[in-house]
Amino acid sequence: MTSPKINGHQLELFAQDFFAALEPAAKSPSPPPQPLFKAPPAPPRIAFPTPPRAPDAPPLRRIQLGAHFLDFELRRSTRRSIGFMIDDNGLRVTAPRRITLAEIDNAIRAKQRWIINKLHERGERRATRDERPPVCWQDGAQLPYLGGDITLRLEEAARSHCIYEAESRELRLGVVPGLAEWQLKERVKIWYQDEARRLFLERLDVYAPRLGVTYSTMTLSSAGTRWGSCTVGGDIRLNWRLIHFSLPLIDYVVAHELAHLLEMNHSPRFWAQVGSVYPDYDGARAALRQRSQELPVLFG
């Protein structure tokens, strides 16, 4: 059998296909060179709370702390030094009238780590509080009182009354026709405050002799960030919401404020005075911080 002949043109096409198959595949473009060291990502901007302002109030001041911008309220007073106060509404600065704005800004920058940390803490507490479900104001609701829960009992009555029965741990509230929820809540709040006033005076009279001090007055406070305060003149203010906590935590705050009549600071000498009548003040301080984050939302 005779094999088929291949002419020159066919041979040339075959050779082209053969050698083309031997050529390496086209190289893909090489990636761009990577830097040896990558710059750290820029820190996220933090949205700090802004103090509320009345329409006729002076504008807030703004300062840059690192990558963050902070608006704060500046107040002038007769005090001798610059004071800082941080609450859920942000930073408030109180300064003597003779202090320049540049000096105030420098003082804020000197304490910027403390300020930013405190604002973070306030933000976390606010977020935790906002996540807690509010109390449903109906018969059988559980209310915090002296470290435990008491049961709210609503009963129809011709005349409003509020009576606490210790044995059953029930707070009986007489509901008159047409009583609105805000009025019910206000009546319970008044009861809490009456209980707080009575108990706080009792505990002050227990701890004042132990510390060898005499206070002048005791008034209730509704402050959002402080459990108590004491003036040089012996005027003590205690937050009525302490009535939600157990007696040992109330005693810690009472001893703390009375000790300020001996030391108007938080020096080691001050804590030694507190420890002389309340040794576990560190534990109480931590427990108070924890318990305050666990309380249900009662009055908004």
Image: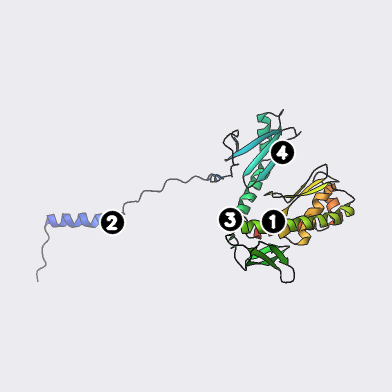
Dot 3 and dot 4 residues touching (CB under 8 Å): no
- Location of mark 2 (residue): 22
| SS state under label 2 | helix
Q: Which of the marked residues, 1 or 3, is nearer the chain's N terminus?
A: 3
Q: Up-down: is 216 above or below 76?
A: below
Q: Which of the marked residues, 4 or 2, is nearer the chain's N terminus?
A: 2
Q: Which of the marked residues, 1 or 4, is nearer the chain's N terminus?
A: 4
Viewer-nearest residue: 178 or 115:
178
Mark 4: which amino acid? Gly
Mark 2: which amino acid? Leu
Dot 2 and dot 3 residues touching (CB under 8 Å): no
Dot 1 and dot 4 residues touching (CB under 8 Å): no
Mark 3: which amino acid? Asp
The span from disc 3 to disc 4 (Cα, nearest Å) is 29 Å
Q: Up-down: is 143 above or below 270?
A: below
Q: Nearer the viewer, mark 2 or mark 1?
A: 1
- Location of mark 3 (residue): 130
The span from disc 2 to disc 1 (Cα, nearest Å) is 95 Å
| Residue 147 picture location, percent across and down | 72, 63
Viewer-nearest residue: 213 or 36:
213
- Location of mark 4 (residue): 83
| Residue 157 picture location, percent across and down | 64, 65
Q: Nearer the viewer, mark 2 or mark 3?
A: 3
| SS state under label 4 | strand
The span from disc 1 to disc 4 (Cα, nearest Å) is 33 Å
